[in-house]
Amino acid sequence: MNTIEKIAIDLSKLTINPIIDNQHKELFLIINNIIDEHYLFVNSRKLSELLSQLTDYGMKHFKEEEEVMLQNNYVAINEHKKSHYAYLERIAMFNFNFSEGNEITANEVISYIRNWWYDHVLKWDVHLSQFLHSKGKNE
């Protein structure tokens, strides 16, 4: 397996609210834990447990983040939510492929997760943070 770089984002300037901010930190810990498990194979129980933990926590995070967007009339709420749904669909496909025994590599799954969260936070969540800051909602 190729080495996958851990997520290292300075979250000090990405403030949405204390709950969401702490969730970002926790999500990155889970993802980096998955990356640390570089020796795992797709069918390993540990990888399955970590992916389930990430999926569950991600769904909780999305729900709370979408509530913040709704409460603040966030201008890009639909696009932001679509990105959440696309992620969940892709993760569901990975899980389906695991359960069906279809060939998929742990590296493929871990790379997707790492890159999606990295890109999502730096694009969508930064935009949300800037929007809230402009309204004086996350200071």
Image (cartoon, grey):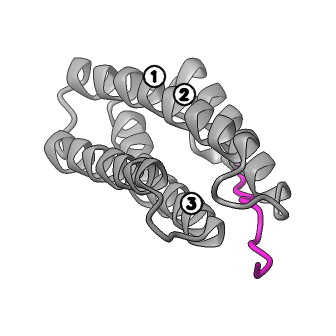
Q: Amino acid at mark 1?
A: Lys
State the image coordinates of residue 126 (x, y, percent, origin top left).
Answer: 46, 51
* Residue displayed at 17% across by 42% down: 75
Determine if the magenta segment contains residue 2: yes
Question: Toward the viewer: 43 or 18?
Answer: 43
State the image coordinates of residue 96 (x, y, percent, origin top left).
Answer: 37, 49
Q: Describe the element under mark 1 as helix, strand or loop.
A: helix
Residue 93, relative to residue 46: is it above or below?
below
Question: Toward the viewer: 118 or 104?
Answer: 104
Q: Amino acid at mark 3?
A: Tyr
State the image coordinates of residue 4 (x, y, percent, origin top left).
Answer: 74, 72
Would you call the spot at circle 3 few (<14 residues within 10 Å), some (14-19), or many (20 or more)?
A: some
Name the residue tied to disc 3.
118
The rendered magenta stretch, by its main secondary structure, is classed as loop
Question: Toward the viewer: 105 or 89?
Answer: 105
Residue most extreme to the front: 101
Name the residue tied to disc 2.
57
Residue most extreme to the bottom: 2
Q: Quadrant of the N terminus?
A: bottom right
Would you call the spot at circle 1 few (<14 residues within 10 Å), some (14-19), or many (20 or more)?
A: few
Q: Describe the element under mark 3 as helix, strand or loop.
A: helix
Circle 1/circle 3 CB separation < 8 Å? no
Q: Earlier in the sequence, mark 2 or mark 3?
A: 2
Q: Which residues are magenta?
A: 1-10
Q: Which mark is on residue 60?
A: 1
* Residue displayed at 45% across by 22% down: 60
Q: Is residue 31 left or right of residue 3?
A: left
Q: Amino acid at mark 2?
A: Tyr
Would you call the spot at circle 2 few (<14 residues within 10 Å), some (14-19), or many (20 or more)?
A: some
